[in-house]
Image (tube, rainbow, N blue to C red):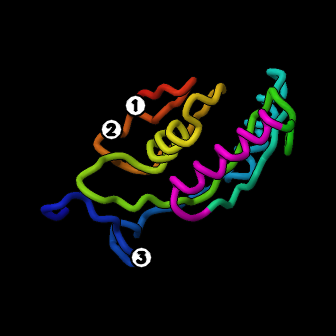
Amino acid sequence: MTAKGIITPKQGDPVFENVQNLIVAGNQEALRAAGKKAESLGYNTLILSSRFEGETRDVARFHACVAREVTASGNPVRAPACILSGGETTVTLTGKGLGGRNQEFAMASVSALGGHRGHRAAFGRDGWYRRPHRCCRCYNGQYDF
């Protein structure tokens, strides 16, 4: 630990000596399961990608463009639609903000969609941001943390 907070251990750190990791599901499996559930609820689903990278706010703006296109033209999937994606995006902090990718995605989505009707959600557990028990949800242009 440093004066600024917790440091992520690096490869070779003794903390990893008795660690075994087992991946039981990845982004693809999670997206397929979410899509299956959405379809059972009557949504037309589209998995954009399980490998998004880049700044989270840019990915959220892209999703907003797709959502507006769905509403305007029925492409690339007809409404009611559930647009899914996953990946490893990043947040560049400026200032003293707290939060992670999910909060950033949710806030950028609300901003990019403005009054556009629909539901948005960002899920995941990105680490420790002084609020480890919460994730950010967006719905109808409102948010909570």
Q: Nearer the viewer, residue 23 or 131?
A: 131
Residue 123 sits above or below residue 93 on the image: above
Identify residue for label 2. 131
Q: Which residue is mark 3?
A: 11
Q: Secondary structure at mark 2?
A: loop
Q: Under tag 3, what secondary structure?
A: loop
Q: Amino acid at mark 3?
A: Gln
Question: Which residue is located at x 46 percent, y 62 percent?
Answer: 19
Q: How many marks?
A: 3
Q: Nearer the viewer, residue 71 or 106?
A: 71
Is 42 placed left or right of 94 in the picture? right
Q: CA distance from mark 1 to mark 3?
A: 33 Å
- Bin the neighbour count of mark 3 within 10 Å (Cα to Cα): few under 14, some 14-19, many 20 and up: few
Q: Which mark is residue 145?
A: 1
Q: CA distance from mark 3 to mark 2?
A: 26 Å
In depth, the one of 142 and 124 nearer the eye is 142
Q: Which residues are magenta?
A: 53-72
What is the spatial separation of the Cα atoms under label 2 and label 1, in whole angstroms? 9 Å
Q: Which mark is residue 41?
A: none
Residue type at the position of mark 2: Arg
Question: Which label's residue is closer to the chain start, 1 or 3?
Answer: 3
Taking 54 as reference, is 100 above or below it?
Answer: above
For residue 135, side relative to residue 78 (left or right)? left
Circles 2 and 1, Cβ within 8 Å, touching? The answer is: yes
